Structure formats: C-alpha cells, structure tokens
Image: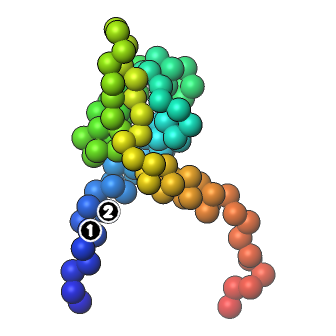
Amino acid sequence: MDKIAGLDEAAELFKALGSESRLALVWLLSREPLTVSALVDRSGLSQPLVSQHLRTLRAAGLVSSEREGKEVRYSLADQHVAHVVLDAIAHVQEPTDQGNEE
C-alpha cells in the first residue's frame, strides 16, 4: 500500500485531541477566544491542568495565544480543528440504529 500523504500528521492531531479535557477546551475555544481564567471557570478544570492542556494544544499547533496586557487570550489556530471536534461530538450523539444489525 502506498503511504497516504498527511497520515502521520493526522495521527498526531488525534493524539493531541485524545483527552476529554482537551476536547472540552477546544469546544470552548471554538465559541470564542478565552483567557486561562475564563477557561478554568467554564471548564471546571484547575488552572494548572488548563495550562498543561493548552501547552499540549499549542505544541500541536491547534491553539494560538495573544497577550493582552497582563493576560493571554487563547484561540483556535484554525477552524478545521473545531469542525473535527464538533463533528465527532455530533457523531456520538446521533441515535444508533440497533434494529438493522445483521
């Protein structure tokens, strides 16, 4: 089989998204750019945990940051990531058709 272009990078993307907490942060950032304190308030995660997950997401190129005075505002680097996450959430929320299994 020929190697599919971008497959390694796509696997790395899914590794970075492979945490319920990181998915929640991406979901929150898909709605609007937020500071760490706002992400802590809205996610229910501790500040150190939010910061750790943001580092992982930044290293993967999924999140960008912009300093605003004393605070840093985080946003998604690319809306494609939001689509991947939102589509995955929509997919798992769809009712399954149990009656057509063969």
Farthest residue, direction top:
70
Residues under labels 2 and 1: Cα distance? 6 Å
Residue bearing the label numbered 1: 6
Where is residue 11? Give x, y as percent.
31, 62
Q: Is residue 18 left or right of residue 90?
A: left
Q: Amino acid at mark 2?
A: Ala
Q: Position of residue 92 (x, y in %)?
A: 62, 60
Residue 31 found in image quarter = top right
Residue located at (74% from left, 85% from top): 100
> Which residue does the image show at 51% across and 20% down from the upper left?
38
Which quadrant is home to the C terminus? Answer: bottom right
Secondary structure type for disc 2 = helix
Residue at the right extreme? 99
> Which of the 4 quarters of the picture holds residue 46?
top left
The amino acid at mark 1 is Gly
Quadrant for the N terminus, please. bottom left
> Dot 2, crowdedness within 10 Å: few (<14), some or many (≥20)?
few
Residue 95, located in which quarter of the rendered image? bottom right
* Front in this rendered view, residue 20 or 13: 13
Please give the residue where the numbered disc 2 appears in the rendered image.
10
Name the residue: 44% across, 54% down.
80
**Quick check: marks 2 and 1 in contact, CB under 8 Å?**
yes
Q: How many marks?
A: 2
Q: 10 Å neighbourhood of mark 1: few (<14), some, or many (≥20)?
A: few
Closest to the observer: 15 or 70?
Answer: 70
Question: What percent of the width, then of the height, locates residue 20?
Answer: 48, 44
Quick check: 93 above or below 46? below
- Element under label 1? loop
Q: Residue at x 21, y 86 (%)?
A: 2
